[in-house]
Image (cartoon, grey):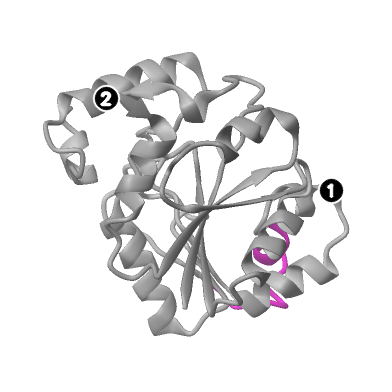
Amino acid sequence: MILAILQARMSSTRLPGKVLMPVKETTMLAFEIERIRQSRLIDKLIIATSTDPSDDIIAAQDLGVDCCRGDLHDVLARFAHCASSFHPDHIVRLTGDCPVIDPQVIDHVIQCHLSSGKDYTTNALERTYPDGLDVEVIRFESLMKAYNESHLQEDREHVTHYVYTHPEKFSIQTVTMEQDLSHLRWTLDTPDDYILLKTMIEKQPDPYFSWQELIDA
């Protein structure tokens, strides 16, 4: 089973409430969920938010996917708790600040992961894709190993940090493409990001546009 966990919270320091900001008569989070659901390889998608009262509004959203809640700051524990409820073979980590994530990119990274047999595969360590198309895939056993062994605050706040900083313990694969487009920023973190992404999304008649169509948007 391949479980996708979409990490989302309301308490962003630079742009509070960003995941529920409006776009195309919906919210950024709902828009992203619908794009993720076009993946051919993901078996189940859930939202992982926190138990902080600020995130009650996320849990209350009717988004058509299960919502799992955990510690606001220990995000690794939140992921481990959510994943343990389903005991998947592999976990796809996605974040709520990537509303234009492309299901074809998701599936490509998943396929590379499955073909390689690695513990952890991502297109976000050695960047060639635009920022905002980030995908991480990790074996369930590797996630639980990180959860059980890591103790530093940075490892707990960033789900896969312990994994990619310990290559002696985990086999790691990076996914890149020939053209380096890492200078493109399609992530939602500031008011300017919101204006740009909202404009780009609303220019597209089809909500399931490919990431390549955004280059000239």
Q: Earlier in the sequence, mark 2 or mark 1?
A: 2
Pointer 2: what residue?
24
Q: Residue at x 21, y 24 (%)?
A: 202
Badge 1 element = helix
- Residue 76 image position (x, y, % from top left): 72, 56
Q: Residue at x 56, y 23 (%)?
A: 17
Q: Is residue 142 above or below residue 132?
A: below
Disc 1 marks which amino acid? Gln
Q: Name the disc covering residue 204, or none.
A: none
Residues drawn in magenta: 161-172
- Residue 29 image position (x, y, % from top left): 43, 36
Disc 2 marks which amino acid? Lys
> Is residue 6 at least partly visible in the picture?
yes
Instruction: Specify the quadrant of the image occupied by residue 40.
Output: bottom left
Q: Is 10 inside the magenta-drawn segment?
A: no
- 113 horizontally vs 206: left or right: right
Pointer 1: what residue?
153
